[in-house]
Image: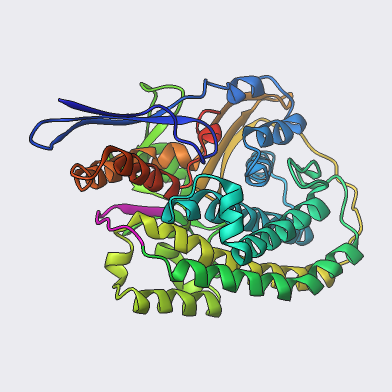
Amino acid sequence: MKKIIIPHIHKIEGEAGFWAEVSRDGKIEKLRLQTLLGLRQIEGILIGRRVEEVPIVVSRICGICPVVHILNACRALENTLEVKPSSLTTLLRKLLLAAQIIQSHALHLFFLALPDFFNIENDLDLMKRFKKEARAALKIREFSLRVTEIIGGRAIHPMRPQIGGFSKLPDKRDIQKLSKDLSEVYDAALFLVKTFQNLSYPSLQRKTNFVSLSPKKEYAFYQGEYILTPKTFSIGDFFSSKIEEDLRRPPVKRVKHLGKPYMLGAIARIKNNQDLLSDEAKKSLGIFFKNHNLTSEKFFENTFYNLFCQTIEILHFLKKIGKLIQEILKQDLKERPFKLKIQKGSSLSAMEAPRGTLFTYFEVDTNGRILDCDIITPTAQFLNNLEEDLKVYLGNLLKVSPDERIRKIRALIRAYDPCISCATH
């Protein structure tokens, strides 16, 4: 029996290791991606807290994607307390969420994933070799963080989103400045798309199910029905009776659907919603298919293409930001008094994080305190799928050198863009 061990996988959010046992005849007997972070007990911290405190605490689950955590917590509690946010609140929240997806993708694509294609370990070496790509990625990320700061109050862990709206609304002049910079940022995104169009991707073929929100009128991110290819479920039905949490391997809630693993994130959203992409995003996707001689079926069997899907989403969401800004500038940006009425109840919200669909559930008592909560993050949902991909991929790597094998295993793990901090909340 041969053991393959990677004690620490760097260039992912959080800490994880890899372990596998391979028989002499090349059969993968055991394989595990092991999280190395301890259980953080965020859900336990929330029990007994007043509803007003909850969103800001939940946002501390992750420093890369705090926006989706705070927004999903707000909406879950709004559903519970029967609060209907204004149209302006919805527009501002969509702008925040689109910006967060963009900045997370830009960070992952250039600094964490691109080095794997050229065996570069040092970020300084990466930036020296790919100066134009570095400037493009940094320009995109700087813009998206500026959006977060203007709308949310600060670039990391925004403070303004709250139940029913925002504690403070942005200055219209700041939003107008964003609109002026958008064209230059979009050009940088097009350059990043072309960079990832021209890469040579590793071979991997494995069929799986793809899960994402599926709205009828816009590409999945803020709201919509829940879909599991090829069947569609309501969000509540999927959450309460179709997914199975496995708590035997703490500190992560590993999730399956009817006993089967599934994929989330950019590749899943595009699989389920590609007709709702912007025109330029659809065009770029078609060019990729043609240049790499790919059918749609083969494209979605290779998880490495999740990377290119992230570049497509950057294009799409920058266009979305432009439209949202125009809608927001038509609104009267004045704060309106809001009084929260406390009542007993429970509810669920689902929203698309950069890495996939986030579920947030709360139960509230008559005093407005949390009785129960359940937060299921994207990484917790796709870890089983990642391990199944690794089993297939590892079978193709048994004859390469140990160093090359480890490098390729790490590359597949990073293609998923896992967030271990979210998974161990």
Q: Decide which of 32, 42 is in the foreground and name it.
A: 32
Q: In the rendered structure, does residue 208 fall within the stretch colored magenta?
A: yes
* Residue drawn 62% across the image and 58% down it: 102
Above or below residue 274? Residue 404 is: above
With 95 as the anchor, is 224 left or right in this view?
left
Q: Decide which of 224, 310 is in the foreground and name it.
A: 310
Above or below residue 321? Residue 284 is: below
Q: Decide which of 341, 400 is in the foreground and name it.
A: 400
With 338 as the anchor, is 219 left or right in this view?
left
State the image quarter where residue 42 is shown.
top right
- The dominant secondary structure in magenta is loop
* Residue drawn 73% across the image and 57% down it: 142
Answer whether residue 233 is visible to the viewer in this image: no
Query: The magenta stretch spans which residues?
Result: 201-211
Quarter of the image that includes the N terminus: top left
With 311 as the anchor, is 292 left or right in this view?
left
